[in-house]
Image (cartoon, helix red, strand yellow):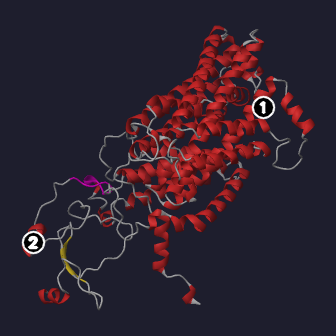
């Protein structure tokens, strides 16, 4: 029976396969895509991804049902929370200017299986998101024509009464997706130009709404007679923040487009900052004028802006609002269709997904096969499925991606910089940290014995310490941590930090409602998990970071990414159990794809190191110790060129 059990070495090698990281090329600017996007192009792509139908629907819904006029504060807090995640994307997008967004960032720092699962969830997120926006676009346009399209379809084609399927096939939603797919397949420049047109119209309409709104504003609508500024109190503001947070999830299209940016090191961070700032400002100002034009409790959640103008006697303004809403939805559709095939391309290029999706058209320089296939799948979803029950599923994939990107920032910042294009040593671990001096990147070999003796006696105490090593000020107090490899303690501390964050947020979310904990145990658990989180944070901070580079770096590491992790986990736990059930099912399907295809076709398999034969050599470790290693040459084989004969080595001993 025991012979059928896997050996410990096999299990260790299997775990190394799951957690191997992507080896980046020496020249990361080299690409088969067309680097044609400027900072303005990327900024407008980000604005198009964020300022969509939410501006016309979400503001009225949150104002009436959740927060009142204090929806303004909800958007401010949500914008700041999104900024933490956006800064993590900005640093990665500048340092790793490759397409793939969260998938790529996780692959180069955390590990292969985690990267695949992130990419797998983002893939579904974009598909459902694009299909849901297409159905909203169809419904909005149909409402302008008094639902004539819907009535015609139900009369001549029929209706369905099947769970999870739409009440009737939405041909208009499928058609707009097919048209958008055709435009996206013409290349990045055409997609960018089309996005410019729709974004310009949308921003013009927003500007009109703001000017007319402030002209028609009545401060009494925030007065006590209407319920005051914050009728639902602090709890309403925070509940509104959780809903408003999802209005800012479109900025990752900028990171996904970094391989097509002319100067990604500067363009990506600037575009993310500009687009997030403009989107936050638009949401705050529109919420302000909306609640000042009419009393917040009289808003129509489905068409708040158009209804507000109608009630103030400007019914013609409703047509402008409708035009702006449709253009805003078009930009979101383009954003989804632009990002999705590029993430699929990145996964296929790495061998984790089917290779057919890694082909780039020689003329348009875009992954046409991925665009067409996933555009058709998105159109099919919009045509036949009832997506209302699945829309909430989008948030969990986004939040999970944000969490892993934030954790990846910490891990990457405390890793030793590897030579580009070089494979990791066997076992995937760098050289251990010396006790008396900093570690060097590799072991050095010397020709003569006198050279070895000189190196043993050399003083290296003045050399700067490498990333991942314990800071000199903490070494007298944490001497036992010097036995670990550089970055190893930080990795363990990041895992501990995330576990503590999950436990802490679980107590905050479920402690009173589901677990019914008594006050003393509720407080005790909060204190314990908070201490675990803070101690992990301090342990990470006690190690050396990578020095400043020429690209953008998020400030206050590890504090900023850690706050982003806590916030994302808290919002994930606020989702209902059905969302988690669907998420688990989709994860199981992803694991089947990974273990059935990805792990066997991964390009990192080709980069795995092979054992090399060494007969005898002197090795001087950075700590100054001298050691001679002897390894027998296999029988029947000659010693490798440049190495002494084994008998000679034995004689020297």
Q: Secondary structure at mark 2?
A: helix
Q: Earlier in the sequence, mark 2 or mark 1?
A: 1
Q: Which mark is residue 344?
A: none
- In-image side of 552 versus 324 (left or right): left
- Residue 89 at x, y = what percent? 47, 42
Mark 2 or 1, closer to the camera: 1
- In-image side of 68 versus 555 (left or right): right
- In-image side of 237 versus 13 (left or right): right
Q: Quadrant of residue 284?
A: top right
Q: Quadrant of residue 308?
A: top right
Q: Secondary structure at mark 1?
A: helix
Q: Which mark is residue 139?
A: 1
- Residue 105 at x, y = what percent? 47, 50
Question: Residue at point 46% right, 63% down?
Answer: 603
- Residue 176 at x, y = what percent? 71, 35
* Residues at marks 2 and 1, CA–CA distance in whole angstroms: 80 Å
Residues at circles 2 and 1 in contact by the CB criterion of under 8 Å: no
Examine the rendered structure and indicate whether residue 403 appears above or below residue 71: below
Tell me the magenta residue range. Answer: 464-473
Q: Is residue 197 visible?
A: yes
- Estimate how packed mark 2 is, as few (under 14), some (14 to 19) or many (20 or more) residues with alpha carbons within 10 Å: some
- In-image side of 531 versus 580 (left or right): left
Number of numbered callouts drawn? 2
Which sits in the foreground, 10 or 198?
198
User: What residue is shown with label 2?
Assistant: 453
Q: Is residue 499 visible?
A: no
- Residue 268 at x, y = what percent? 44, 37
What quarter of the picture does the N terminus occupy?
bottom right
Examine the rendered structure and indicate whether residue 268 appears above or below residue 295: below
470 is within the stretch colored magenta = yes
Which sits in the foreground, 292 or 539?
292
- Estimate how packed mark 1 is, as few (under 14), some (14 to 19) or many (20 or more) residues with alpha carbons within 10 Å: some
């Amino acid at each position: 029976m025991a012979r059928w059990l896997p050996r410990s070495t096999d299990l260790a090698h299997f775990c190394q396969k799951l957690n191997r990281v992507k080896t980046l090329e020496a020249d990361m600017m080299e690409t088969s895509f067309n680097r044609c996007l400027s900072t303005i192009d990327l900024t407008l792509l980000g604005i198009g991804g964020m300022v969509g139908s939410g501006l016309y629907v979400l503001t009225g819904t949150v104002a009436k049902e959740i927060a009142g006029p204090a929806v303004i504060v909800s958007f401010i807090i949500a914008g700041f929370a999104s900024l933490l995640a956006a800064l993590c994307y900005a640093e990665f997008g500048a340092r790793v200017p490759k397409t793939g967004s969260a998938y790529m960032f996780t692959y180069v720092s955390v590990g292969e299986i985690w990267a695949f699962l992130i990419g797998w969830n983002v893939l579904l997120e974009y598909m459902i998101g694009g299909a849901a926006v297409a159905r909203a676009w169809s419904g909005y346009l149909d409402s302008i024509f008094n639902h004539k399209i819907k009535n015609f379809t139900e009369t001549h084609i029929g209706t369905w009464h099947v769970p999870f399927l739409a009440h009737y096939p939405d041909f208009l939603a499928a058609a707009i997706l097919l048209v958008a797919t055709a435009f996206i397949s013409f290349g990045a420049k055409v997609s960018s130009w089309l996005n410019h047109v729709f974004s310009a119209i949308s921003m013009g309409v927003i500007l009109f709404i703001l000017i007319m709104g402030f002209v028609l504003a009545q401060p009494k609508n925030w007065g006590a007679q209407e319920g005051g500024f914050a009728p639902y109190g602090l709890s309403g503001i925070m509940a509104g923040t959780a809903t408003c947070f999802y209005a800012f999830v479109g900025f990752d299209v900028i990171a996904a487009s970094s391989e097509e940016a002319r100067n990604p090191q500067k363009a990506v961070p600037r575009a993310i900052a500009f687009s997030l700032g403009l989107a936050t400002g638009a949401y705050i100002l529109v919420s302000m004028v909306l609640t000042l034009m009419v009393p917040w409790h009289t808003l129509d959640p489905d068409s708040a802006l158009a209804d507000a103008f109608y009630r103030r006697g400007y019914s013609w303004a409703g047509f402008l609002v409708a035009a702006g809403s449709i253009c805003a939805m078009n930009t979101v559709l383009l954003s989804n269709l632009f990002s999705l095939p590029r993430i699929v391309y990145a996964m296929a290029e790495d061998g984790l997904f089917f290779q057919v999706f890694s082909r780039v058209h020689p003329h348009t320089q875009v992954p046409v096969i991925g665009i067409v296939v996933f555009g058709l799948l998105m159109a099919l979803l919009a045509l036949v499925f009832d997506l209302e029950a699945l829309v909430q599923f989008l948030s969990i994939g986004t939040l999970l991606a944000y969490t892993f990107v934030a954790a990846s920032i910490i891990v990457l910042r405390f890793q030793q910089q590897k030579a580009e294009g070089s494979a990791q040593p066997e076992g995937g671990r760098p050289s251990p940290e010396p006790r008396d001096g900093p570690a060097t990147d590799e072991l050095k070999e010397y020709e003569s014995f006198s050279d070895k003796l000189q190196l043993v006696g050399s003083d290296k105490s003045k050399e700067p310490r490498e990333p991942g090593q314990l800071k000199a000020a903490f070494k007298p107090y944490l001497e036992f941590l010097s036995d670990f490899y550089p970055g190893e303690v930080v990795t363990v501390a990041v895992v501990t930090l995330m576990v503590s964050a999950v436990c802490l947020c679980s107590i905050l979310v479920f402690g009173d409602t589901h677990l019914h904990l008594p006050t003393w145990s509720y407080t005790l658990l909060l204190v314990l998990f908070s201490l675990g989180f803070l101690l992990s944070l301090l342990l990470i901070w006690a190690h050396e970071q990578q020095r400043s580079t020429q690209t953008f770096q998020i400030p206050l590491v590890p504090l900023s990414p850690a706050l982003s992790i806590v916030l994302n986990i808290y919002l994930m736990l606020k989702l209902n159990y059905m969302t988690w059930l669907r998420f688990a099912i989709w994860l199981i399907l992803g694991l089947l794809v990974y273990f059935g295809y990805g792990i066997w076709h991964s390009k990192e398999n080709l980069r795995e190191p092979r054992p090399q034969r060494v007969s005898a050599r002197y090795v001087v470790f950075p700590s100054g110790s001298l050691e001679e290693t002897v390894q027998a040459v296999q029988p029947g084989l000659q010693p490798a060129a440049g190495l002494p004969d084994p008998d000679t080595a034995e004689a020297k001993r």
